[in-house]
Amino acid sequence: MESKDLLIEAYSHITRIVHQAADGLSQEQLSYRPEEGSNSISWLVWHLTRIQDSHLSNVVQLEEAWLTEDWADRFGMADSIGIGFGDGPEEVAAVQPPGAILLGYHDRVTGRVLDYLPTVDAEELDRIVETNYDPHVKAGIRLMSVVQDNTQHAGQARYLRGMIERLGI
């Protein structure tokens, strides 16, 4: 098995978990937060997708779909270029797109990632994509950091789905 096959499986698995978490939920359920300081499924899926979008942009020198395909407008967040780092309760609560928009954005971004991954080989994984850190960040490290981050957030969203179902929300 080649590295690109593992990466394709990892990104595909994240999408499966995201859909398990969000498919069929109402906007109210997607926006549910167990307490004021916690995240919602909407925010978690938006955030993990923004991470994919911004980091893929960095790796392949591709404009972010969020900015170039009107996703910010569709989310009702036209002025937002952020990816969720440092968001407080107000910012989390403001992410309330319809489920079709939320999953549409996720699927579009993951589709772009999956279009890129078959081109990946050892040379590509070793390519420096970020020089602001020491050591410099290679494409393979950036791709894996997204997998790690996204897997955690997708799992959190799936956990919230279970909570919503158990509580009958």
Image (cartoon, grey):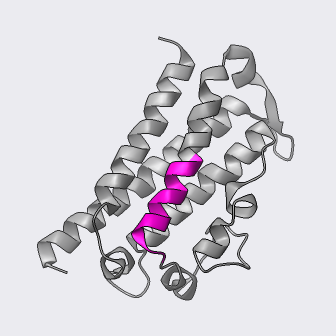
Q: Quadrant of the C terminus?
A: bottom left
Is residue 99 within the magenta segment?
yes
User: Image height check: is 28 above or below 23?
Assistant: below
Residue 67: tell me if it is visible: yes
> On the rendered structure, is 101 left or right of 158?
right
Q: Which of 74 and 155 is in front in this view?
A: 74
Does the magenta portion include 165? no
Q: Is 48 or 132 nearer to us in this picture? A: 48
The residue positioned 41% from the left and 88% from the top of the image is: 36
Residue at (68% x, 44% y) in the render: 56
From this viewpoint, is residue 85 visible?
no
Number of numbered labels in the structure image: 0
Q: Which residue lies furthest to the top in this view?
A: 1
Quarter-of-image position of residue 103: bottom left
What secondary structure predominates along the stretch shown in magenta?
Answer: helix
Residue 6: x percent and y percent?
48, 24
Task: From this view, report whether residue 134 is shown above or below residue 6.
Answer: below
- The residue positioned 81% from the left and 45% from the top of the image is 133
The residue lying at 31 percent from left, 76 percent from top is 26
Residue 39 vs residue 123: left or right?
Answer: left
Q: Position of residue 124 (x, y in %)?
A: 73, 22
Q: Is residue 60 above or below residue 109?
A: above
Image spot of residue 75 (x, y percent): 57, 74
Left or right side of 6 for 112? right
What range of the chain is rendered magenta? 97-109
Residue 35, horizontal then vertical, whole percent:
35, 85
Q: Residue furthest right?
A: 131
